[in-house]
Image (tube, grey):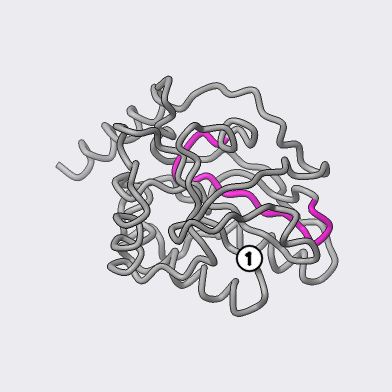
Amino acid sequence: MRKLLSTLALTLVMFTAPALASDAVIGQPAPAFTLTDTEGVSHNLSDFAGKIVVLEWTNHECPYVMKHYDTGNMQKLQEQATADGVIWLSIVSSAPGKQGYTTPEEAKAIIEKAGAKATARLFDADGTVGTAYGAKTTPHMFVINEQGVLSYMGAIDDNASPRHDTVEGAHNYVMAAIDSLKKGEMPETTQTNPYGCGVKYEAM
């Protein structure tokens, strides 16, 4: 049954991940944006100049997202990164009526239950920012350096299974990218194919 569910989930991703025209290019300035968080506070990417920024596209109902939150993996990464001065922004691009869409109050309850440690959770209900970045899946990860240059985009790690037990032993591309940037180096791996559920844009 587990194998069947995994196969179905992977098939779902294959057919729901949209082909997006993206402005996000490794080695170029990350697309600018302004989004509102769960408290109604606006966050502009330029607010974080001089900081490493991680963008995490999320959907709390996606099995691949659940894999990382149910095991505590995503919270651990968020906590480690933010304790080291990294800005971690979770972004929800699910459109109203689509899987993963929440109100700010619902999102706060989800964050509290999961014990999420991101700097903020931002709402992109019209998909403008997700489209600009070419965010295809949840999770889809982006790492931006202190100069605002996109330095990594793709999968969170190298194990695309939705099974919880695959978190352990996986190579985490995001933390590897952060470590390289902290040393003043470009990440060894700058781009990978993201895995997860397709982002639930309005048109999908």
Total marks shown come to: 1
Q: Identity of the amino acid at label 1?
A: Ile
Q: Position of residue 64 (x, y in %)?
A: 36, 48
| Nearer to me, 199 or 44 | 44
From the viewer's perspective, is residue 2 above or below residue 40? above
Q: Left or right of 121: which side holds 42?
A: right
Q: Left or right of 80: which side holds 14?
A: left
Q: Which residue is pictured at 54% across the width and 67% down the height?
A: 119
From the viewer's perspective, is residue 127 above or below residue 91? above
Q: Which residue is pictured at 72% across the width and 60% down the height?
A: 47
| Nearer to me, 158 or 121 | 121
Snapshot quadrant of residue 30: top right
| Nearer to me, 173 or 143 | 143
Q: Position of residue 153 (x, y in %)?
A: 64, 45
Q: Position of residue 124 (x, y in %)?
A: 50, 41
Q: Which residue is pictured at 43% across the width and 58% down the height?
A: 38
Q: Residues within 10 Å of mark 1 (few under 14, many from 20)?
A: many
Q: Position of residue 54 (x, y in %)?
A: 62, 57
Taking the view exactly as shown, the residue that stands out farthest to the bottom is 83
**Residue that carries the numbered disc 1 in the rendered image:** 87
Q: Quadrant of the C terminus?
A: top left
Taking the view exactly as shown, the residue that stands out farthest to the left is 1
Q: Quadrant of the N terminus?
A: top left
Residue interval drawn in magenta: 135-148
Snapshot quadrant of residue 147: bottom right
Does residue 146 belong to the magenta stretch?
yes
Question: At numbered mark 1, what does the secondary structure look like: helix, strand or loop?
Answer: strand
Q: Which residue is pictured at 63% across the width and 65% down the height?
A: 87
Snapshot quadrant of residue 167: bottom left
